[in-house]
Amino acid sequence: MKEWPPPLPPLLLLLLLSLSSADDTLSPDTPLADGNSTLVSASGVFELGFFSPGNSRNRYLGLWYKNIGVQTIVWVANREDPIADRTGLLKIGGGDGNLILSNQSSYVFWSTNTSSAGGGAAAKPVAQLLDTGNFVLKADAGDSDGFLWQSFDYPTDTLLPGMKLGWDFRRGLDRALTTWKSPDDPSAGDYTFKVDPHGSPQVFIRDRSAIEYRNGPWNGVQFSGEPEMQPNSVFAFHFINDDDEMYYMYQVTDNSVVSRFVMNQSMIQRYVWFDSRVQWSLYWSMPRDQCDYYGECGHFGVCNSNDSPICECLQGFEPKDLSAWNMRDASGGCVRTTDLDCTSDGFLRMSKVKLPDTANSTVNATMSLEECRESCLKNCSCTAYSSSNISEGDSGCIIWPDELMDIRQYVDGGQDLYVRLAASDLQAGGEDESKNKQVMVIIVISIASGLLLLGSGGFCIWNRMRKRSRGNIRSGLRLVSFDSVTALGPTQGHFSEENSREKELQLPVYDISTIVAATENFSASNKIGEGGFGTVYKGELEEGHTVAVKRLSKYSLQGLDEFKNEVMLIAKLQHVNLVRLLGCCIHGEERMLIYEYMRNKSLNTIIFDKTRSPQLTWPKRFNIIIGIARGLLYLHQDSRFRIIHRDLKASNILLDEELNPKISDFGLARIFGGDQTDAYTKKVVGTYGYMSPEYAMDGIFSVKSDVFSFGVLVLEIVSGKKNRGIYSTEPQLNLLGHAWRLWKEGNLMELIDGSMSLCNVSEALRCMQVGLLCVQERAEERPHMSTVILMLGSASAMLPQPKQPGYCSDRSTTDTEWSSSCTANDVTVTIVEGR
């Protein structure tokens, strides 16, 4: 017969039960000590304890996911006041029931201070970590409703499902996200994401006080600047605005999905965790492109990322500074062509737009759209109106009393905006006060436009011919072709041809005489660069604008059709980290591209020059790395096309006046279709030292080919050394091999460029580890650029260990040549090229 063990004594049983149920709970009798234990939520979703970020030795009290292998910090208590040693202790104070974080010297680093929030003292307080990730302080263990304090009210850089982003007016509480200062320092950085309660509420990304991004007002369904924010089977979105609170919140309706919303560097990003890939995957991010940056097209300008150029003035408006506008600097905005008279004005309806900045607008939720229109007409200062709620038809009213800023045009999404115009500026498609008046205006404008077109057309032809003649006479220069011997043909009589090309290319087409005059007949003194595809000259246009003219070599195999395709491709790419194409010139065999001028030229002219490299401080270098990464992410994921650059290298990274990076030279770029992941070519083109093994050996290229090139660039930027260099201690190794050996020995710090007087070592080490991950031999093991940006910018992201890179070993042969042997997948190819 089976014997049962004797029952446990009641006191021991009670003690065991209390211990087993206290894993998620802190009481006055059970403080939490650093190194001793952690709190784990009831279902094991979240964990709270002490940690050290990155390579820092400081200790912080924080919250992270329990069962995700990559430690991801979602909340930090003492972010502004770290503990220097491991004597931290979290306890509930006996006097007022507050949570107190102190050390062995009883110095208080952080506390909840519930009395200032109206919570008051508690008789039997407990703190509990919930499965939502909310760490709460309760009056007693049985209190499941009201909290004396909760971590959800004090977010750091992460918004979890169920958290509120915004205002609690009763307590004067502003819940906002703030970036970490660095991967090793969770204290508040420069960027914030917070709700602005003025006018119709919006959420802004700010760099300190400067606005970087605005998501538009909530329209009952979504923020008007985030058309992809549609409720679905995974996410539900809410915005509450009443007398007590104003906040945004999201819920994850699928319990199998783990997601977080992060303020990361200057971007807001939503990530989803995939167990199968053991990594966070970027689901969505803002700003997505150049049109998302605040005020890109100025007052009364409209930004459309599908157009080139991306900015245009509203109907009835013209550029305030036409010269700057033609150079694609639209920040000055637009001005009215006809003043309003407040009696005969009408409205132009714009559909599918992001509504303008509503900070100074007035909102009336009870009005109909027609009542809103009448109210705007009666107010002479009203410049536009729109409905405030589109969830059940158009209802509510937003009225703008001043200039309209930050309008964006969408293909899908957005909503209707009614812009006030003078009667003479209304055309077909606009809404006027009466049908008869609209018809009359259309007829009058049509007749006047026809007459004006005839007159202006003749004037333009005469004026262009006059300018050409004057330009040739003034310069007195003989126009030369590629070989500087053969004279070019006459430049007159090509107006109609250039005009048709301008329409075809959707880009300004310059005549040859303008370019010759701008570059002083391609003077050697104006030469600023040279490569396999041609020479680059500095030029000065008549308006005083400085440009860079890339004159393609006559030996280039690129035909006219290929050149046009390249021009149209570059013209449609608009991103702050891509060089801006201003126009082109086609004349006979001449092919020229006109770019914005970069005062600091290319990265290689500084980073590899020991006399100039010290000006690239570590913050500048890190900014360059991040900028290149964002530009690549735009090409791979966020642009209209999926684009593989194929020739990413230091000489193709241009630096503006502030040393911000811009990716250039898209002569080798390839467009991928929506489902295409890689491609094959028999003609391998690019630059050895930056080419991935699978591309150099087998002609296979993909986004991972660009990732490899990016990894090489990162290591070059941090070290100040060329990949295809010689190392006295290891003559058989290039930079990748040298870095790999140092990594295996644990001496990667030795690779950091010694010309930098000050360097954030932990940040530099993180960059180099990311660089090594990007140059791994197998393409499938390299991260995507979205993951790269996360790893570079998030101190809480645990980086995987890199595997051996697919590097090339170099050896010096003679004074006039390099011999490079590249090994990948057991195939060896030897290339000899001139130094």
Image (spheres, grey):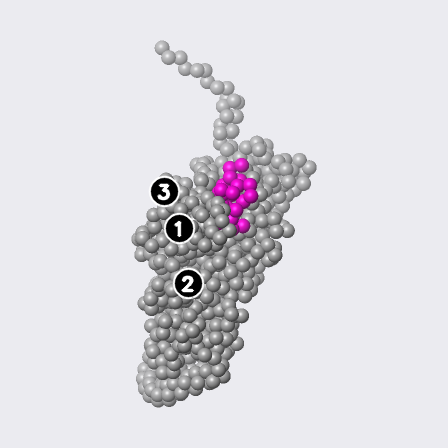
Q: Can residue 642 be seen in this view?
A: yes
Residue stretch in magenta: 721-745
Which quadrant of the structure image shows residue 304? bottom left
Q: What residue type is labelled 2?
A: Phe
Query: Nearest the camera: 793 or 555?
Result: 555
Mark 2 surroundings within 10 Å by alpha-carbon count, few (fewer than 14), some (14 through 19), many (20 or more): some
> Disc 2, disc 1: CB below 8 Å?
no
> Disc 2, disc 3: CB below 8 Å?
no
Q: Is residue 201 above or below residue 82?
A: below
Closer mark to the observer between disc 2 and disc 1: 2
Query: Nearest the camera: 680 or 270?
Result: 680
Q: Mark 2 points at which residue?
A: 533
Magenta region includes residue 775: no
Q: Residue at x 36, y 42 (%)?
A: 827
Among the two numbered marks 3 and 1 on one chain, the one whose residue lies closer to the N terminus: 1
- Point out which mark residue 705 bears: 1
Q: What residue type is labelled 3?
A: Val
In the picture, measured across the screen, residue 404 lies left or right of residue 101, that is: left
Q: Which amino acid does label 1 sit on?
A: Ser
Query: Nearest the camera: 76 or 521?
Result: 521
Q: Name the residue under label 3.
A: 827
Q: Disc 2 on helix, strand or loop?
A: loop
